[in-house]
Amino acid sequence: MAATAPAPIPIPFPPTRHERSALILFASETGTSEDAAHLLGGIAQRLRFATRVAAMDGGGININELRKYTIVVLAISTTGQGDLPANGRKLWKSLLRRSIPAGYLRHVDFTTFGFGDRSYAKFNWAARKVHRRLQQLGANEFYGRGEGDEQHEEGTDGAFVPWSLGFKKHLAETYPLPEGVEPIPDEEFLPPKYILKIITPEAESDTPTQNEAPPKMNEGINDPCFKGAFNPADLITDDTPPPDDILEIPGHRVLTLTKNVRITAEDHFQDVRHLSLEFKGNVQYQPGDVLTIYPKNFPADVDSLIKLQNWTSIADKPLAVVDSAAHP
């Protein structure tokens, strides 16, 4: 029986494009690439791009979605033997389909930054192969790709920081703002991506309240109400340990921290520590297993924070985290 050729991907016409938009994607194993993606998203947002930051395999992300944005930026870590992290493999596999027409991404302007470790043989292979595949599909590199190396004396920041500064400059020059429109100043907070909403019967249908203009980053620090309001000694007057009944997590185990020793020199910029944890009972684990630690706060510290922030009247009310896009 003859094999049936896969059906070609239809080209949507015309592709929907915003006037100035940026799609910042990440494929991250430990959060490094995700943090970088949000930083790059902030740069684009300050230059007045309608910006979306998401995992490569995030909701609604597919090859057609790449065509809808003015620019596409990918921050990609390498894991294993040159592989993409788990949250980037679905899109990557879809890009490898032979049925994709030649030049399908010819209207896409993109760049990539890879995070890797030169001590591994396949240094930054994940970002390199994604970058190469996008070019094979016709996408245009609008800014030179970058690569971060964990072996650099400043870690991956040694390459990422100057690359991101150049990215900002290039973006401003290549996609200039309309006359009379200025970038969002660095000292001004960006609009929040998420909003904390107090859940009360009378306010369930209310939309969260936001200030008309975002505050400046240094606004209010000289307010008289803050002077003398905080005394560090107040945080250590009560040694009552955190209750056992808070932060219940399914399948959790209670551990005791028995050692917390700094292993880097005191004058080194990184504070790396050796932690020893004591388990109760018999715990089985294998090399490569991951331990997630959820610390608890001391009640006295929590009370001090509540009073300092003037949250006493709402401290016991439930909160919901809502997407600010749903509450313009």
Image: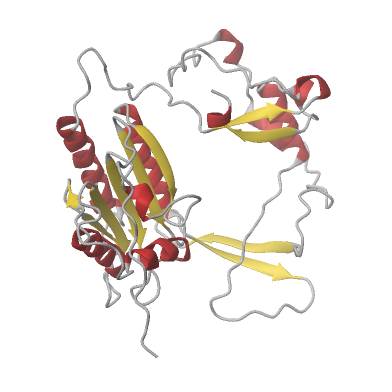
User: Is residue 21 left or right of 262 when viewed as pictured?
Assistant: left
What is the x, y in percent for residue 312? 76, 22
Residue at the front extreme, as displayed: 1
Give percent across and percent down for residue 64.
Answer: 36, 51
Name the one closer to the observer, 177 or 244.
177
Q: Which colour scheme is used?
A: secondary structure
Q: How many marks?
A: 0
Camera-side residue of 250 and 119: 250
Q: Residue 128: horizontal and vertical position, in percent? A: 24, 65
Question: Looking at the image, which residue sits at the far top?
Answer: 224
Q: Give the quarter of the image for residue 311.
A: top right
Residue located 22% across and 23% down the image: 177
Q: Residue at 17% across / 46% down in the picture?
A: 143
Q: In this view, does 321 lie to the left or right of 212?
A: right
Quadrant of the frame with the N terminus: bottom left
**31 up-or-down from 202: above or below:** below
Q: Can residue 36 be seen in this view?
A: no
**Where does the image place residue 146, in percent across and percent down from the top left?**
22, 54
Rendered residue at 75%/56% (across/down): 249
Which residue does the image show at 32% across and 21% down from the upper left?
185
Q: Is residue 23 visible?
A: yes
Q: Which of 279 and 6 is in front in this view?
A: 6
110 versus 92 height, above or below:
above
The answer to whether 45 is drawn above or below residue 27 in the figure is: above
